[in-house]
Image (cartoon, helix red, strand yellow):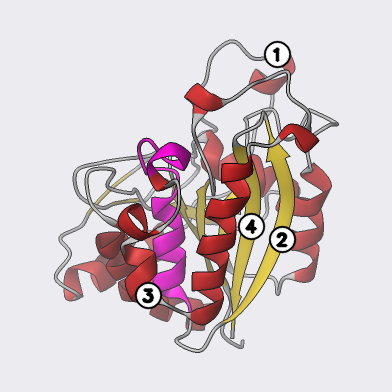
């Protein structure tokens, strides 16, 4: 099997699979065009720990880690098998890179199962989840991605799941897509230009260098997974951008595929 790309997904609201106004079809199309992986290693913004933890669950539960949504959402399940072998391999690679890591069984939070439900609806690809460290910086998460990068040569799709902009305090849930705050485009344009140029120094220092960084990410747990995906990418990656629009005025949904 040739080397798999790494992905960053803007997973949006938990209602993505059941809300017809959201771009769920784009995730389905993305899954259909990617090479089929033997397993998936997922890093989601919604599982944060002090140090990296790799989930060895044999049958990860579907975690409904949200409140106040339609009942139909809580009835959804994503019964994919776990990938404890991938979890243990990831932990070994991280330990070998000097990043102390532990393992434990853990389910799939909505940042993991929501996009996977759309991309791989048969739930027949084993999934392991690796936690992020919300108190650590982009450089740490880049190093995590770099450490687990060899898994992509062994048929493992490495996926970071978060949101390219994530300021819920600035969200207007009555806004239309055309009402997007202009600062969203300024931030995403800067970020995508730097990704296209492979300007790692600027990207890792985004909170200082990117326009409106603190407004777009009052806390940056939803952006940290992109740095793991970037670390897992080839040095000479080709960037494919899947721009899905801006919702609720300040919540942009963009997916990145790092190919090559």
Secondary structure under tag 2 reads: strand
Q: Which residue is mark 2?
A: 242
In the rendered view of the protein, which quadrant contains the N terminus?
bottom right
Of the image marks 2 and 3, the number of the one nearer the N terminus = 3
Foreground disc of the pair 1, 3: 3
Q: Main secondary structure of the magenta part?
A: helix
Q: Which residue is mark 3?
A: 200
**Distance CA(mark 4)–CA(mark 2):** 5 Å
Q: Quadrant of residue 247?
A: top right
Secondary structure under tag 4 reads: strand
Residue 104: x and y in percent read 29, 45
Sort mark 1 into few (<14), some (14-19) or many (20+) by Cα contacts within 10 Å: few
Secondary structure under tag 1 reads: loop
User: At 28% across and 69% down in the image, what residue appears?
Assistant: 143
Q: Which residue is mark 1?
A: 70
Q: What is the span of residues highlighted in magenta in the rendered image?
A: 214-233
Q: Nearer the viewer, residue 141 or 251?
A: 251
**Left or right of 77, for residue 32:** right
Q: Which residue is mark 4?
A: 255
Residue 5: x and y in percent read 58, 75
Instruction: Check residue 220 for magenta coloring.
Output: yes
Foreground disc of the pair 2, 3: 3
């Amino acid at each position: 099997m040739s080397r798999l790309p790494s992905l960053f997904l803007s997973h949006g609201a938990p209602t993505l699979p059941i809300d017809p106004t959201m771009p769920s079809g784009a995730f389905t199309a993305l899954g259909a065009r990617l090479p089929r992986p033997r397993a998936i290693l997922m890093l989601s913004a919604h599982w944060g720990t002090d140090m990296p933890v790799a989930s060895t669950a044999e049958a990860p539960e579907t975690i409904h880690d949200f409140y106040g949504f339609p009942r139909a959402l809580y009835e959804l399940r994503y019964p994919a098998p776990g990938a404890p072998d991938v979890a243990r391999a990831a932990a070994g690679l991280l330990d070998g890179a000097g990043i102390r890591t532990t393992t434990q069984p853990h389910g799939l939070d909505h940042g993991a199962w929501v996009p996977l439900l759309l991309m791989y609806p048969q739930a027949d690809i084993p999934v392991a989840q690796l936690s992020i460290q919300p108190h650590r910086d982009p450089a740490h998460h880049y190093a995590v991605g770099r450490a687990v990068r060899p898994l992509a040569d062994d048929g493992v799709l490495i996926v970071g799941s978060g949101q390219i902009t994530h300021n819920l305090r600035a969200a207007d849930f009555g806004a239309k897509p055309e009402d997007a705050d202009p600062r969203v485009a300024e931030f995403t344009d800067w970020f995508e230009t730097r990704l296209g140029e492979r300007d790692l120094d600027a990207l890792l220092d985004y909170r200082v260098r990117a326009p409106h960084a603190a407004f777009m990410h009052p806390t940056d747990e939803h952006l940290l997974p992109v740095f793991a995906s970037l670390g897992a990418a080839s040095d000479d990656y080709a960037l494919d951008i899947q721009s899905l629009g801006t919702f609720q005025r300040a919540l942009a949904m963009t997916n990145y595929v790092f190919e090559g």
